[in-house]
Amino acid sequence: MAVARVTEIISSSKTSFDKAVAKGVKRACKTLKNVESAWVKDQKVVVSDGEIVEYRVVMKVTFIVE
């Protein structure tokens, strides 16, 4: 029987939401073992002078506890 844990992370990218998700998952895999999935809970943009300058995602990352 496996036991899973969920942790919330925030990741950002200057180019897109997709890159922010990929960057967050890649970083989570460096710290957490046995990452199984990620669920994008929220998306936000940072605006400066009427332009989008940053894309942010809030993700729930699930990993299996050894």
Image: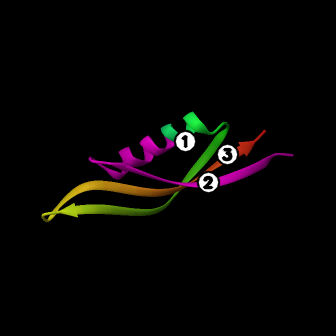
The residue under the point 43% across, 48% down is: 21
Query: Is the residue marked by circle 3 packed among few (<14), some (14-19), or many (20+) residues within 10 Å?
Result: many
Tag shown at residue 3: none
State the residue at coordinates (64%, 43%): 36
> The residue under label 2 is which amino acid type?
Thr
Q: Position of residue 34 (x, y in %)?
A: 67, 38
Read off the residue under disc 1: 28
Label 2 CA crowd tier, 10 Å (few <14, some 14–19, many 20+): few
Look at mark 3 in the image and give the residue it sits on. 63
Q: Please indicate whether residue 54 sits to the left or right of residue 8 in the image.
A: left
| Residue 47 within the segment the image draws in magenta | no
- Asked if marks 1 and 3 touch (Cβ < 8 Å), the reply is yes
- In this rendering, position of residue 52 left or right of residue 28: left
Q: Camera-side residue: 34 or 27?
A: 27
Task: Judge from the rendering whether residue 27 lies leftward or rightward of residue 50; answer left or right.
Answer: right
Q: Please give the residue where the numbered disc 2 appears in the rendered image.
A: 7
Q: Foreground residue, 58 or 2?
A: 58
Q: CA distance from mark 1 to mark 2?
A: 10 Å
Do callouts 2 and 3 mark residues in contact (Cβ within 8 Å)? Answer: yes
Query: Residue 57: image x %, image y %?
Result: 42, 56
Expressed as whole percent of the image width and height from the top left, the position of residue 11 reads: 42, 50
Question: Magenta region: which residues?
Answer: 1-25
Please give the name of the residue rendered at 40% of the width and 62% of the height, measured from the top-left corner.
43
Q: Amino acid at mark 1?
A: Ala
Quick check: marks 1 and 2 in contact, CB under 8 Å?
yes
Quick one: SS at disc 2? strand
